[in-house]
Image (cartoon, rainbow, N blue to C red):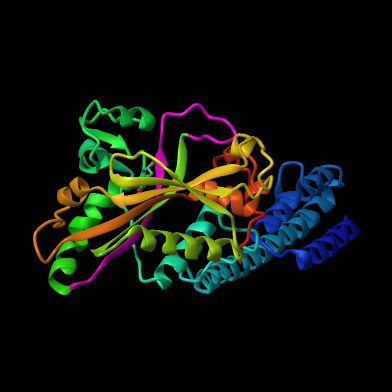
Amino acid sequence: MKTKIQELKQKFNIELADVRDTKTLEELRLSFFSKKGYISALMKELGKVPAEQKKEFGQIINGFKQELSDRFDEARRELVEREEELAVNCAEAYDESMPTVNPGGSYHPITLIQRELEDIFRSMGFDVEDYNEIVDDYHCFEALNIPKFHPARDMQDTYYLDTPNQLLKSHTSAAQNHIMMKYGRALKEQNRPIRAVFPGRCFRNEAIDACHENTFFQMEGIMIDKDISISNLIYFMKTMLSEVFERDITVRLRPGFFPFVEPGFELDIQCLICGGDGCPSCKNSGWLELCPCGMIHPNVLKYGGINTEEEPYQYTGFAFGLGLTRLAMMKYGIKDIRVFNEADLNALSQFVSK
Ligand code: DAH
């Protein structure tokens, strides 16, 4: 029995030396003190010991039990202290203001192209503006010379909210009125031309295929000053596109009808995916409608509080609505518009800013 106790002491010492946390310590404690533990086994053996030796062995086992339980208590105290200290130190080491290091992250291709365009337009003196996604009928249509029941509304069927008169904007042109109101005074009083671009998410009730999405991005731009003409419009469009594609690209201008511009144009670029031969992305035409544009209709200027007739404030301006999503398809060679909204990280993480 004495040897047995000696062996158990040794076992205990060896195992305790390896214990690093309270959980393992508890496991060790149970291996000695639980019903099926070593101490219970010793007590059972005590039953077999001759009666005259029982007292002596009983005292030895009790002493052993006491010694073990003291050492467990002491070890637990030390471990708890150490664990608490560690938790406090870790909390101190964590600094929530530190930027996250996430080497796996990347920007969405639309974000990349939008930022690039913002930089280009800023360098040409444009302000970059933001606007709501939920707008009212007036801003989306009426203020753009598209009265109720005008056939041009058919092209822009969108999503209407239950709240009366609220809808998801079908084009970034919806912000034109707001921008004119915001900068009109500086134009009149300080001769500061209005030059602004406003990128944004747009929505349309569309049947989805390789070139149509119900959610897409545009970047609208307007410039208003005295003597603004179509030449200014063409100059800005050409400069911008040559910056984006870092080469000369082939463009064509066609007449186009939009109620908020007069005259109105469609600026097309030759499809960079098929080089003009025809493919699903360009509906086999070889051309991609990239940027409808035109001279802002006098009614729209009037609704925006901009003078068009009264001397000396005869202002004119141009506007354009760049298809950001389309532009990203062209620039990155993305053949299917659905890639943008599918959240497939394998596809979306391939794009890097230049
Ligand atoms: N808002 C039009 C659309 O989404 C595009 C557009 C056409 C914008 C002509 C313009 C413009 O600024 O001048 O269909």
Measured along the vertical axis of the image, is residue 59 above or below residue 98?
above
Residue shown at 58% from the left, 37% from the top: 338
How many marks are shown on the rendered structure?
A: 0
Measured along the vertical axis of the image, is residue 168 above or below residue 82?
above
Residue shown at 20% from the left, 49% from the top: 298
* Image-quadrant location for residue 195: bottom left
Quadrant into which the N terminus falls: bottom right
Can you name the residue that lies furthest to the left here? 310
Horizontal and vertical percent position of residue 73: 62, 63
Horizontal and vertical percent position of residue 97: 46, 70
* Image-quadrant location for residue 247: bottom right
Q: Is residue 263 visible?
A: yes
Quadrant into which the C terminus falls: bottom right
- Per the rendered image, the range of residues in magenta is 191-213
Horizontal and vertical percent position of residue 286: 62, 41
In this view of the protein, which residue sits in the foreground, 226 or 48?
226
In this view of the protein, which residue sits in the foreground, 247 or 79?
247
Per the image, is 326 magenta? Answer: no
In this view of the protein, which residue sits in the foreground, 272 or 102?
272
Horizontal side of 141 relative to 216 (left or right) equals: left
Horizontal side of 6 relative to 308 (left or right) equals: right
